[in-house]
């Protein structure tokens, strides 16, 4: 099983915008799926809060339900003139959180 | 042969006897009560805390679509082409549906809420923007349970609300 919590940030500057794409390795259990062997519901465990900081200041916050796909993929933009060091924090329903950062 | 017949008749008689019925039904109920689950939800993990598993039956969702739309402030929103919502017309896999929203300059936008109408939890994600975002843009892969509308509600800083919605047909549902 790939390491849960590993994330990748990739940035691409197009004109005056920096497209920030990030993906996190995470199973995203919705709480409605059954384990095929035990026939019991797998308890929910999904990313519910994503924070994007630029140079230490919070730029974007996202509150998510269980609707993000497994290994959630998010893409947002930042103004190219202001983008310096991008930090993405993912937090899931168990309270665990993971950070990753990338300089533009 | 006759022995088997005798056996099966004996079992039938036993099972249908009123005494057994009156004994097993309350027994079953007390057992399920002690496990903390109703008889219909026998597949919940015993001993799991209520916070770990949301105690709602499957398909009822945390809130109905109307409730969630109202909570998010959908009332009074006008459908607008300024909210560019890009979704596939037909999603081959409901577990990975690319949803892209572009609502213009981020300096004017406060937040974007994405709803997937027929999901158990219709409110999929809310994104709060700041002017440093440049553009109020969002792209992600979402899960869709079945064919339904995908709506993007954009709440502007001046209080006005715009939305756009598109129908996405799902061939294989993705909520597990």
Image (cartoon, coloured by chain):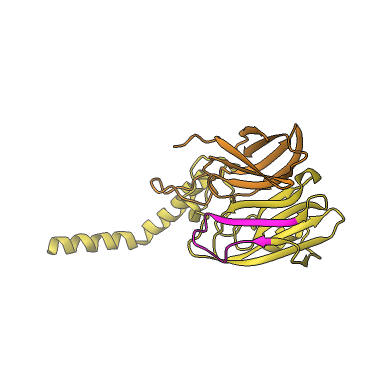
Chain colours: A orange, B yellow
The residue positioned 58% from the left and 54% from the top of the image is B142
In the rendered image, the residue lying farthest to the left is B1
Magenta region, residue range: B85-103
Q: As drawn, is A36 to the left or to the right of B143?
A: left
User: Where residue B126 sits: x, y (%)?
Assistant: 71, 51
In terms of image quadrants, where is residue B59?
Answer: bottom right
Where does residue B28 sit, x and y in percent of width and height? 44, 51
Percent of width and height locating residue B78: 79, 67
Identity of the residue drawn at 13% across and 64% down: B2
Q: Is residue B122 left or right of residue A1?
A: right
Question: Is residue B118 something that shows in the picture?
Answer: yes
Q: Residue furthest front?
A: A15
> Nearest the camera: A5 or B13?
A5
Label tally: 0
Q: Quadrant of the C terminus of chain A?
A: top right
**In the image, residue B151 lies in the stretch drawn in magenta:** no
State the image coordinates of residue A2 (x, y, percent, origin top left).
47, 36
Q: Does the magenta run of residues contain B100?
A: yes
Residue closer to the observer: B157 or B133 = B133
Res. B121 in view: no
In this view, the residue in front, A4 or A78, is A78
Q: Looking at the image, is B3 positioned above or below residue A52? A: below
Which quarter of the figure is the N terminus of chain A placed in?
Answer: top left
Q: Which residue appears at 82% of the width and 55% of the height?
A: B156
Pick the front one: A103 or B20: A103
Q: Quadrant of residue A38?
A: top left
Q: Is residue B95 left or right of residue A9?
A: left
């Amino acid at each position: 099983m790939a390491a849960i919590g590993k994330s990748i940030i990739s940035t691409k500057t197009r004109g005056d915008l920096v497209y920030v794409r990030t993906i996190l390795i995470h199973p995203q259990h919705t709480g409605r799926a059954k384990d095929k062997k035990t026939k019991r519901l797998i308890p929910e465990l999904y990313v519910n809060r994503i924070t994007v900081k630029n140079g230490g200041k919070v730029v974007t916050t996202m509150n998510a339900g269980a609707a993000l796909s497994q290994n959630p993929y998010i893409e947002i933009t930042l103004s190219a003139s202001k983008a310096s060091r991008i930090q993405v924090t993912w937090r899931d329903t168990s309270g665990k959180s993971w950070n990753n950062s990338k300089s533009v | 042969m006759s022995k088997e017949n005798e056996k099966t008749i004996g079992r039938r008689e036993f099972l249908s006897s009123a005494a057994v019925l009156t004994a097993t039904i309350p027994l079953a109920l007390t057992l399920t009560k002690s496990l903390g689950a109703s008889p219909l939800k026998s597949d919940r993990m015993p001993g799991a805390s209520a916070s770990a598993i949301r105690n709602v039956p499957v398909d009822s969702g945390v809130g109905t679509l109307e409730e969630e739309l109202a909570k998010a402030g959908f009332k009074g929103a006008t459908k607008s082409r300024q909210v560019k919502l890009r979704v596939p017309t037909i999603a081959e896999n409901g577990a990975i549906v690319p949803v892209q929203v572009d609502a213009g300059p981020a300096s004017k936008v406060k937040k974007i809420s994405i709803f997937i109408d027929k999901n158990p939890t219709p409110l999929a994600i809310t994104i709060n923007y700041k002017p440093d975002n440049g553009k109020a843009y969002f792209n992600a892969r979402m899960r869709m349970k079945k064919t339904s509308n995908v709506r993007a509600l954009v709440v502007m800083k001046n209080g006005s609300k715009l939305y756009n919605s598109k129908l996405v047909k799902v061939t294989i549902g993705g909520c597990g």
